[in-house]
Image: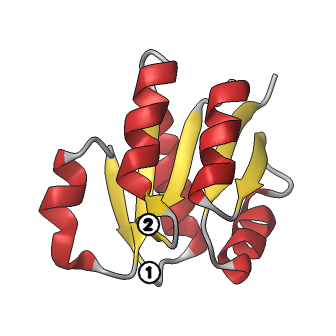
Amino acid sequence: MSIKILAADDDKAMISLYLRIFSGTDYSVSTALTFEEASGLLRSEDYDLLITDYMFPDGLGTGLIKLFKEVKKGAKSLIVTGSPYAKEKILAEGAEVLLEKPFKMDQLLAEVAKVLG
């Protein structure tokens, strides 16, 4: 059984990047382009990991992390941002890892493996 990841980002290029990075791995990736879409998927599907952008036009990634922790015991999350100024605040709101854009493919895969244990 593969590990299920939800990758949420309002940038279609980032979504394409996640799909490329995880293709051919043991990870099964679903994607969402909006906060609302990601919220619906978190409520209706069982994911092992949430990878989310910090800022969406309709919400914050930290809100998705909070929701994920409410619907799944032991939920793990990784937040990606181009705005590292709020790093401590973001991590305090529940993300296990904050990854700054731009990042390297190997860096993301290493962080995912570490978060999932």
User: What residue did someone put label 1 on?
Assistant: 101
Quadrant (top left/top right/bottom left/bottom right) for the C terminus:
top left
Q: Which mark is residue 81?
A: none
Q: Residue furthest right?
A: 24
**Image point (31%, 80%), residue name:** 83
Few, some or many C-alpha atoms within 10 Å of disc 2 (few <14, some 14-19, many ≥20)? many
- Residue 26 lies, in percent from the top left, at 78, 40
Mark 1: secondary structure = loop
Q: Which mark is residue 80?
A: 2
User: Which three-letter amino acid code belongs to the residue tagged 1?
Assistant: Lys
Looking at the image, residue 5 lies above or below residue 46: below
Mark 2: secondary structure = strand
Q: Is residue 46 left or right of residue 75?
A: right
The number of numbered discs placed on residues in the rendered structure image is: 2
Q: Is residue 105 left or right of residue 70?
A: right
- Residue 29 lies, in percent from the top left, at 76, 48
**Image point (34%, 52%), residue name:** 97
User: Is residue 25 at least partly visible in the picture?
Assistant: yes
Q: In terms of image quadrants, where is residue 40?
A: top right
Q: In terms of image quadrants, where is residue 109?
A: bottom right
User: Which three-letter amino acid code belongs to the residue tagged 2?
Assistant: Val
Looking at the image, residue 77 lies above or below residue 32: above
Few, some or many C-alpha atoms within 10 Å of disc 1 (few <14, some 14-19, many ≥20)? few
Q: Is residue 97 left or right of residue 89?
A: right
- Residue 114 lies, in percent from the top left, at 43, 42
Q: Nearer the viewer, residue 96 or 67?
A: 67
**Image point (57%, 56%), residue name:** 35
Q: Are marks 1 and 2 in contact (CB under 8 Å)?
A: yes
* Colour mode of the rendering: secondary structure
User: Is residue 117 at least partly visible in the picture?
Assistant: no
Q: Point out the tag, 1 or 2, that comes first from the N-terminus.
A: 2
**Image point (64%, 79%), residue name:** 11
